[in-house]
Image (cartoon, grey):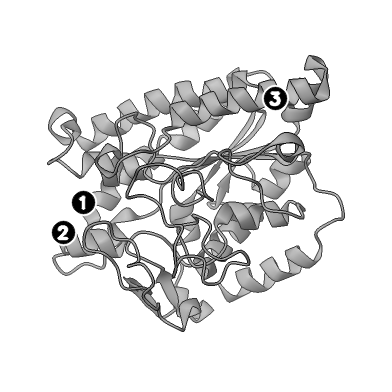
Amino acid sequence: MVSVLFRLLELQTLVLAEPQVPCYFIFGDSLVDNGNNNALTTLAKVNFPPYGIDFVNGPTGRFGNGRTTADILGELLGFDNFIPPFATARGQDILRGVNYASGAAGIRAETGQQLGGRISLDIQLLNHGITISRLVALQRNLAFTKDYVSKCIYTVGMGNNDYLYNYYLPQYYPTSRLFTPDQFAAVLIQQYSKQLKTLYNYGARKVAVFGIGQQGCTPAELAMYGTNGSACVEMINDAVQLFNNRLKPLVDYFNNNLYGANFTYINITSITAGDPSSAGITFVNTPCCNVSTTTGQCIENQAPCSNRNKYVFWDAYHPTEIMNLIVSGRAFRALSPSDAYPYDIRTLAQL
């Protein structure tokens, strides 16, 4: 992991004056939300300290202490400014891309509803349709816009909340009674496949699909379930892996059957499998901030730990910026063949 950080710093110094792609569109949940939830009536928003303590603009609605993986990937792709949230993107802003991500959002429409408002993947896609219409109006040429967006990078990271805020909350949702873990993974993939096809139909051609991380290792799930002596809640990790195992065949299907499609799978499990202590990270299962027992988020205005680069987790669910640096660095330039399939995001940008 030390080599990852050095390589990432090296990559950032090599960023060209012009971005490697014309625009970058981001779909996802709280891992990459950069403010879309701020105006919603929801518990899933964090536009208050100590969130953003290490971010240049302070608390913005990002669910961490600093930059998200999407922020860092944008830098690695050569963008001078952070990609704006759909909630506030206006005018020429959209020419460089839009971030649609929303905390508590899922593949399924009902996911996360116990927390309040959120923007599901279906609604994020509708919002992208609005952006495409705005681009056509700005560029005044439908053919030009189609060609323009076909060269852009799209990242999609969904499914986390369909487990955390759906399947494993039986007091709110019936899914764990209706489906075995394998059936639920199949149902999710079936819906996800249609959603990604919709993105393709909007003009996306370079799409990186992020897998789900090991949710059974988050402080929130460890506190809720215990581990029976193992390091993580293996029941949850095993269920999530059933979903992840279906992403590589899905990518193959799209690439073989959709004209001009270049989908790739980013394997978060592989990327985060190493020993974090090699990068100086010593606290692997405790949050850096004092967290609410209700939401797992940092308690407002309470001081977090001072040695944030030594923690995997910022709050009970979300990683610190140091972990986001590692994940985005290896998603952009894979260190292992298992990190990305069939190619990393750097290669995807060059296609």
Looking at the picture, tell me which residue is in the foreground, 23 or 87: 87
Q: Secondary structure at mark 1?
A: helix
Picture quarter with the N terminus = bottom right
Residue 134 numbered tag: 3
Callout 2 crowding tier (Cα within 10 Å): few <14, some 14–19, many ≥20: few
Q: Position of residue 325 (x, y in %)?
A: 58, 64
Please give left or right for residue 85 compared with residue 163 in the image: right
Q: Splitting the image into 4 quarters, where does residue 58 fall?
A: bottom right
Residue 225 numbered tag: 2
Q: Position of residue 235 (x, y in %)?
A: 21, 51
Q: What amino acid does circle 2 point to?
A: Tyr
Callout count: 3
Q: Position of residue 114 (x, y in %)?
A: 24, 41
Give me the C-alpha separation between circle 2 and circle 1: 10 Å
Residue 235 numbered tag: 1
Q: Position of residue 304 (x, y in %)?
A: 40, 77
Q: Secondary structure at mark 3?
A: helix
The answer to which of marks 3 and 2 sits earlier in the sequence is 3
Point out the frontmost of discs 3 and 2: 3
Q: What amino acid does circle 3 point to?
A: Arg
Give me the C-alpha separation between circle 3 and circle 1: 45 Å
Q: Secondary structure at mark 2?
A: helix
Which residue of the protein is positioned furthest toward the top in this rendering? Answer: 142
**Residue 156, visible in the rendered structure:** no
Please give left or right for residue 146 compared with residue 293 in the image: right
Picture quarter with the C terminus = top right
Please give left or right for residue 276 compared with residue 142 in the image: left
Q: What amino acid does circle 1 point to?
A: Met
Q: Residue at x 54, y 38 (%)?
A: 100
